[in-house]
Image: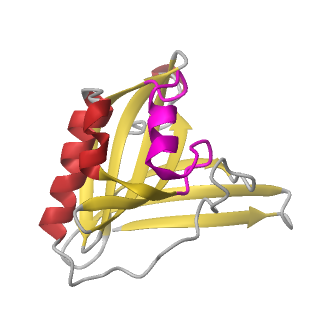
Amino acid sequence: MFCNAYQSLNDGAAQWVTMDMFYTDAEGLILEHWDTIAPYVSNTASGEDMVRGRAAVDTSADTDASKEIVLEYTKQVLQEREFGALDQFVSADLVQHAPEIASGRDGLANWLHSDDAGHYEMLFQIIGQGDFVVTYGKRHAGGKDIAIFDLYRVEGGLIVEHWANAEEISPREALGNSGKF
């Protein structure tokens, strides 16, 4: 199970975006939980809201095909840094919700080439339903390890919409639990 939520605390004094992934048993009881929490950014590079966008899942879409596209994109583009393959996986008019990435495939390409993108080191989980797919992984950028959720909407064999939420991973000695993974 997965959710992407906006939080406003103390009459807007603190605004956050939280992405949560839950592993549940057959009865729906939560067995494990992972999350990232980041400040809400109202003025994103693309002009799109960090949370809004298409929310209805197209359950008629082939979940396995959607997951395969995202998995190959993650492996080839994000991990292996084969940026020439970007057009095989991402629509030219990609709707971008990640706060620091400009709209379209070109905006994504520019960000991937930047130091801010860093290197995607590990894919920990991938789940999907219909045309929506979520990955949870780790990247390294600016000397920091970062937990990252990427939420994708796939249509016509390409990623057409993208949300992301990232949180710096604290040093192991500062963790109060088992950490992000």
Expressed as whole percent of the image width and height from the top left, the position of residue 165 reads: 52, 48
Q: How is the image coloured?
A: secondary structure
Q: Which residues are magenta?
A: 96-118
Q: Nearer the viewer, residue 179 or 146?
A: 146
90 horizontally vs 80: left or right:
right
Taking the image as shown, residue 135 lies to the left or right of residue 75, namely: right
Report how many numbered discs are placed on residues in the image.
0
Residue 122 shows up from this direction: no
Furthest-top residue in this view: 143
Placement of the N terminus among the 4 image quadrants: bottom left
Residue located at (84% from left, 63% from top):
10
Is 157 covered by the magenta stretch?
Answer: no
Would residue 107 be counted in the magenta stretch? yes
Residue in the image at 54% along x and 39% along y: 167
Residue 25, located in which quarter of the rendered image?
Answer: bottom left
23 versus 54 height, above or below: above
* Image height of 83 relative to 59, above or below: above
Tell me where residue 97 sits by quadrant: bottom right
Q: Where residue 12 appears, x then y in whole percent?
A: 83, 63
x, y percent for residue 181: 34, 39
One can see residue 97 in this view? yes
Q: Residue at x 20, y 48 (%)?
A: 71
Residue found at x 16% / y 73%:
62
Of 75 and 16, nearer the camera is 75
Q: Position of residue 18 (x, y in %)?
A: 56, 57
Left or right, 167 with reference to 86:
right
